Amino acid sequence: MSAPGTSFDQSGILPVASGRASWRHLRRLLNEQRRPVTTVLVIQAVASSAGLVGPKVLEDVINNVTRSGGAGRIDTAILIFAAALVVQTVLTGVSRGLGAVLGERVLARLREQFVARVLDLPLGVVERAGSGDLLTRASTDVDDLSYTVRAGLPQLLVASVTAVLAMAALLWTAPVLGLALVPSIPLLAVGTRWYLRRARSAYQGEMAAYARVNSDIQESVAAGRTIEAFRLGPSRTAQTDRHIKEWIAWERRTLGLRTVFFGVSEVGYVIPLVLTILLGGLLHISGGLSVGAVTAAALYAQQLIGPVDTLLAWMDEVQVASASLSRVLGVHEIDPAPTTADEPVDEQVAARALAYAYNEGHDVLRGVDLAPVPGARVAVVGPSGAGKSTLALLLAGIYAPRSGRATVGGVDSHLIPPGRLRREIALVTQEHHLFAASIRDNLRLVVPDAGDEELYAALDAVDAGDAVRALPDGLDTRIGSAGSVLAPGVAQQIAIARLVLADPHTLVLDEATSLLNPGAARHLERSLARLLKGRTVIAISHRLHTANDADLVAVVEDGRITEFGGHDELLAASGAYAALWRSWQGGVS
Ligand SMILES: Nc1ncnc2c1ncn2[C@@H]1O[C@H](COP(=O)(O)OP(=O)(O)OP(=O)(O)O)[C@@H](O)[C@H]1O
Ligand SMILES: [Mg+2]
């Protein structure tokens, strides 16, 4: 049985949403924007309808001419024609603008939902997946999507509405001429499918082949002397020739694809026009249709070409975008971290029969019990790979146990929402992350409404107050990015001050100072010592002198606590701890 939040693929690859799930999500997004969507569609419908007035007016003029032999009210016709053109132009511009705004809104919602969901993911899932995949989804995939939404969505909206209306107008003018559209549909569908299936890999091949030729030439130029010295000229030339030939072959291939596809689509566009005129002509001869109606219908068939062309041209981009969308929406397929509303009743941190496995069937912790009296200091020692860091992650609520419980005040740690959990227990490792923001913002992450006095008090508590006061911008100093003016030690102290502000009653230290040089470590330990005062501390360390200071020592070996007791007591017992202590003493003396 797997614990909640750990049920997804252990390989760490985040899921990708299915086409249907993406579509459902997109519909829900558009539903949220129902008003703007309707507005854009209505305005575009009016604009496109205005575009359909021209052929109708022409139909009247032609019918007047053929019937009465005179042009009739031709100036009125021209006026209507011109007015329709103005309306169409203006409204198309408006709907494109609104369509672009709509696109940005949808994108913004997508990004917001992505970030919100990622922040709600179980920490263990994010740890396992690594940040790379999430970052790619948040950057590259969202960018691909943005391009299509920004540039494509307004055009696609305009084209779809125009195409539908032109078709409707054709059918309204002469329903039978709808037959003229029929042969094009399968032709365009099959042709487009054929092209899209081949185009992407062909263009990738062409780009790769071009890149090879480019690097051949660059290398040959850069290494000209070496090539001459070793008489590599002929072989370099032969290689470049071969790569050029490959490139040409790819060019031929993509050109071939374009030739076929453009040919097919041109035929697809022209067939309705030809058939409209042919069928219309026959019908006119048999007396079924006026010349005006045939003309109008032919013009509508002509009007279909532009929008259909746009729709087909965007097909490829839409495919890329939908692949990106599935990846962006993939995070919604993971169950969010389960949470509880239960409040811890006291400050007791406890592990009971705790077991955990990174890979099913291989427990790295088994039956671990640990319940230090609040305020106690426990040292956790043991050989590398024993499971100490895993124990720390479970106690701090970052992983959910496979079985057993890790609790704070009687509530399962991994179920407490992060914002509340950090007031109870915090994990301190050697990584101190500061965000690219001011010192004030970094500190306020944990106490959003803290005033400067409170912030300086926290900094003073870790001995960093004066260092920050001495900065020209004080708390407004930007840190965490390139060009930061802080000494690395101060940065670490700020991270520790953040813990002072969070004020958890229990701290789990996992080798917090092991990577530092002895001088820096002592400095940091002084700051840490102030943080630790009055709190429960579970300290994992290779440096056994922390064990010496601790009230109790737990020895972890192969996923279990094998010895537990006071330093002297364990030394007297001459077990694993005594052996570790002796070898450490030997090492430092
Ligand atoms: N992300 C992971 N995926 C799979 N196995 C892991 C992972 N992290 C740790 N392990 C394995 O779990 C076991 C316990 O590892 P853990 O890091 O808890 O040991 P440790 O006692 O902290 O060791 P060290 O003293 O070297 O830090 C080891 O066998 C380790 O290989
Ligand atoms: Mg470790």
Image: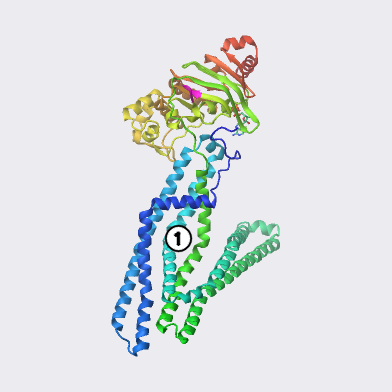
Residue drawn at x 53%, y 56% as measured from the top left: 320
What residue type is disc 1 on? Gly
- Disc 1 CB within 8 Å of nearest ligand 1 atom: no
Q: In the image, is 26 to the left or to the right of 48?
A: right
Give the image location of residue 504, x and y in percent: 43, 24
Q: Determine the secondary structure under disc 1.
A: helix
- Quadrant containing the C terminus is top right
Q: How are the colours assigned in the image?
A: rainbow
Give the image location of residue 63, x and y in percent: 37, 84
Circle 1 residue? 152
Q: Is residue 511 visible?
A: no
* Residue 81 image-quadrant placement: bottom left
Residue drawn at x 55%, y 19% as measured from the top left: 370
Give the dominant element type of the magenta stretch: helix, strand or loop: strand
Q: In the image, is 511 to the left or to the right of 162?
A: right
Give the image location of residue 330, x and y in percent: 52, 46
* Residue 556 image-quadrant placement: top right
Does residue 149 show up magenta in the picture?
A: no
Q: In the image, is 419 to the left or to the right of 403?
A: left
* Count of labels in the image: 1
- Quadrant containing the N terminus is top right
Q: Nearer the viewer, residue 131 or 496?
A: 131
Examine the rendered structure and indicate whether residue 295 appears above or below residue 187. Answer: below
Q: Mark 1 packing: few (<14 Cα in 10 Å), some, or many (20+)?
A: many
Location of ligand 2 given as a quarter of the image: top right
Residue pushed farthest bottom? Answer: 69
Q: Nearer the viewer, residue 471 or 80?
A: 80
Examine the rendered structure and indicate whether residue 106 appears above or below residue 281. Answer: above
Residue drawn at x 36%, y 74% as measured from the top left: 53
Q: Nearer the viewer, residue 537 or 477?
A: 537
Q: Nearer the viewer, residue 236 or 189?
A: 189
Q: Which residues are magenta?
A: 407-411
